[in-house]
Amino acid sequence: MPAASPPLASAASRAAGAPRPSARSRGRARVAARAASSSTPDAETTTIAASPARARSRAALETTSDPPSPRLGVSRRASLLSAAASVAFAAPLSSRADPSDPDDLDEDAAQALIEASMRDVLAANSGEQTYPRQTAFGEAASPAPLEASFEVSSLWDVSPATTALGANAKATSVANWREIVDPVNGKVVQDVTVFVTPNYATANIDDLGKPENVSVAKALGLDTYDDSYRRADMLGSAKRVAKDGQVYYDWELVASPPPRSCPSAVGCLYPDHIYLMSATVRGGDLYVMSLDAFPENWRQAGNSLRRIRGTLEVRTRRDDPQGGAATGAGEDAN
């Protein structure tokens, strides 16, 4: 049984008839009680007042002890699962598949289909472009023994070609594409026309002299086709030689609108036509391509349009059995 506190002991002694202590004794008892209470701190005070060596030992134990075991187990398990998943998916599918297991073979086939579909989508939407050729006079009924073609980016929309064949072997045949549209900048070409004039006056385009000295509209017979060719000014010219040795003359012409059609005396804001032209003579016939660029989008598309003009090619028709390997030259060049 625990000892009674001094007040209770005093009360018990009085109840038992013990003599009452003197005032001096009571004072001594109170002093002793205070000393006892001050020398018996609680747990918190004991911790604070612990010796430096004990405090250092306890701090060392707290810093070196492991975290609670349940949390450590969860963290370790999650790390192991994550590492296993990354290794499994990093390994090639063929290394994980069992050829003798039909389920694994089905997974292989399904994965192959998914990858093929993704490649198709990326090819269609990644901006990769090819340059298919637009062909004129490639029909068997065409009186022209050769065909003319040029390349346009697969990202651009080209209107279908219309062809007006010459009524006889001396008449000019004309193929026309009404416009070419860039999905980003809008219409960039307002007309592409290919003319074939049979039995031309010269056997080679070089016979016309230097390209910069050629009177384009008159020499190519275009002044009777459209008056804008006659009004056009030459901005540039060049001679190029194709891989097969065929010589082409290239020109860049600008035709302003007629004066009466401009709203002010200053002139019109844009030219009426920007012609990119290429011509050659092959098999005795004159072939001329005239690309009429849309003036308002010339700044954005000019270089691409010059590239189209530079791809004009005149060659043996593909349906000509005597054309042989010549028909495949330059097809779908990229």
Image: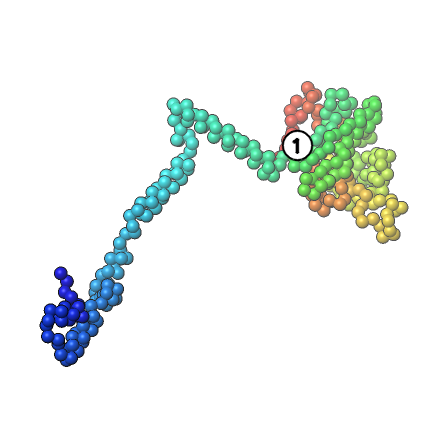
Which percent across, then down, holds residue 82? 38, 41
- Residue at x-position 52% and y-position 30%: 116
The total of numbered circles placed on residues is 1
Is residue 196 visible in the rendered image? The answer is no
Which percent across, then down, holds residue 84? 37, 39
The amino acid on which the numbered mark 1 sits, given as a three-letter code, is Pro
- Location of residue 167 by image quarter: top right
Instruction: From the image, tell me which residue sits under label 1.
Output: 132
- Residue at x-position 68% and y-position 23%: 318
Compared across the picture, whether 54 is left or right of 72 comes to left
Which percent across, then down, holds residue 190? 76, 38
Q: Nearer the viewer, residue 67 or 38?
A: 38
- Toward the right, the furthest residue is 260
Compared across the picture, whether 106 is left or right of 137 comes to left
Q: Mark 1: few, some, or many residues within 10 Å (few <14, many ≥20)? A: some
Which percent across, then down, holds residue 331? 65, 29
Is residue 60 placed above or below 20 in the rendered structure? above
Q: Nearer the viewer, residue 184 or 288?
A: 184
- Location of residue 34 by image quarter: bottom left
Q: Report helix, strand or loop for mark 1.
A: loop
| Quadrant location, the N terminus | bottom left
| Quadrant location, the C terminus | top right
Is residue 195 visible in the rendered image? The answer is yes
Q: Nearer the viewer, residue 260 or 286?
A: 260
- Toward the bottom, the furthest residue is 24
- Location of residue 43 by image quarter: bottom left
- Residue at x-position 70% and y-position 25%: 316
Colour logic: rainbow
